[in-house]
Amino acid sequence: MADSHGNTVLHALVLVADNSKENTEFITAIYDRILKITARLHPKIKLEEKENNDGLTPLKLAAKNGKIGVFSHILQREFQENHYKHLSRKFTEWVYGPVHSSLYDLSSVDTNENNSVLEILIYGSEIPNRHEMLEKEPLSCLLEDKWKKYGGGMFFFNFLVYLVYLLIFTTVAYNKKDLPFIPDDAWDYLYVFGQLLTLLANCYFFVIGIVGMTRKRPKLQTLLIDGYYEILFFSQGLLFLVATVLYWAGRQEYLGFLVICLALSWVNVLYYSRGHKHMGIYSIMIQMMIVSDILRFFFVYIVFLLGFSAALVTLLMEPQLKNQTKIENPSPSDASTTNNKCVTPHYQNVSHTILQLFKFTIGMGDIEFIHTHQYMEVFYLLLIGYIVLSYILLLNLLIALMNNTVKKTTMESAGIWGLQRALTILEMEKRLPCCLKKSFRSGVERKLGTAFGDDRRRCFRVEEMNWNKWNTDLVNISEDPGYCDRSQRTDLDSTSRGFSIGLKLFLSPILNICRPSNISLFFPQGEAGEAFSWRAQ
């Protein structure tokens, strides 16, 4: 049965999970028990595959709501009982000490299905711990497999194409020519061809910026983090389109938009740093400091800069008299004297004052030409107050905040880099033609052959290291490769078990006579998971 939202009891269990240890153990125990009861009473009903009104199974609902405890349990659930083994999503193939080789069920996980778990996590900007969920198996190894198969090669090829675009764009911008321009030789035709290529490339960046932000649908608080490079590429394309319109309109203002677009194009090379882990983490730290610390610093700094600039201009500007006469038609001699005179900059100009105060912030200010003003005390008071607030307080506070950001993001930067690379992998996958998608598809079709009939699933093999369990049982080494379906037993199990017991009984009198200390005998493990070991005391 389901409620008005289409949620079954499994959906309800996922919704009430809170990621705490006690709650997770309680919820997962009830979850498994309901699955077993349903399988026993109604074998044909697949309760876990039922979707609610939003098209979400319990696994997808756990991913969408960030319930990492329940999510991890569902992905890695394995039942050892033969009559419940078909409910598992993990099947251990073989175990040797701490090394485990397991098959994970890829249903609802891989991107070959609509609204898969990978897409929910990667595009779900509202999920706070999604980078931690992507580190769970089999998601981590699945993304690594996709990167090795096609993601890394396609990403490097895109990087080379972008470098070619940068060289063409820089060459065209450096050799700019104003309209009307009529090509008359081969170099002029190459210049026009470079302009067209640059225009097409920036139209592409403009479109993919919009598509990326639409697909992620980031909220306002996550827009600058999840949509950071989408915003930059969108701005790059928009600036070039505006420059193109002004260029064809014959306006010289196009040059300002063009050079800003050129600088932004070179900055966007950092997008391709996510292909390398260490460079990607370094780029993430820069991104986090820009969107958090530097933006807040500039907001406060601009308030101080504009406020003190307005105060200084008001203090030093000479009052205008009502009866002040103006020379409307200066004589030619006066005009020549004015034109040849060297004008000294002064604080009565707002833009010059702002520039001078900015120089004081970085320690390059100069006040020699203002020494003769009658309000020098007030001037020095304003100047000292500005220097204390901006140079001493704000800059040191910015350094402290950036240091704190580096420490805080050091633990999370690897996960954020993995999330960004996962997003890149999905982007590369969407550009693959359908024929290549099938050939590059991860996993293999396996016939699990459970007790409930022919069970074929697409699984992904993962080799794991479980040192915690290995440390608790050092005297036994499991060397049994086993079968995916342990219900398909052979007589080798009973033979191996009988041989182990017989060998133990045969060697007991001999070892009792020798009585060595700390001698361990290791016996092969049967399919039932039993290992016989005996220590002579």
Image (tube, rainbow, N blue to C red):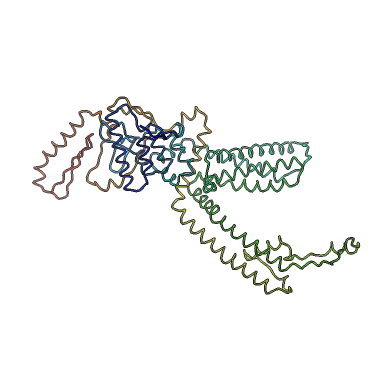
Residue closest to the eye, 307 or 531: 307
Is residue 476 depicted above or below 494 in this figure?
below
Residue 492 image offset from top left, x and y in percent: 21, 30
Q: Nearer the viewer, residue 291 or 55?
A: 55
Among the 4 quarters of the image, the one containing residue 13: top left
Camera-nearest residue between 392 and 158:
392
Q: Going 46% across and 57% down the picture, which residue do you hit?
A: 407
Q: Position of residue 509 (x, y in %)?
A: 8, 42
Residue 2 vertical position relative to residue 368 in the rendered view, above or below = above
Q: Position of residue 361 (x, y in %)?
A: 62, 64
Q: Quadrant of the N terminus?
A: top left
The residue furthest top is 454
Whether 299 is drawn above or below 482: the answer is below
Q: Position of residue 493 (x, y in %)?
A: 20, 32
Instruction: Indicate the quadrant where residue 309 lies.
Output: bottom right
Does residue 490 appear to the left or right of 440 in the view shown? left
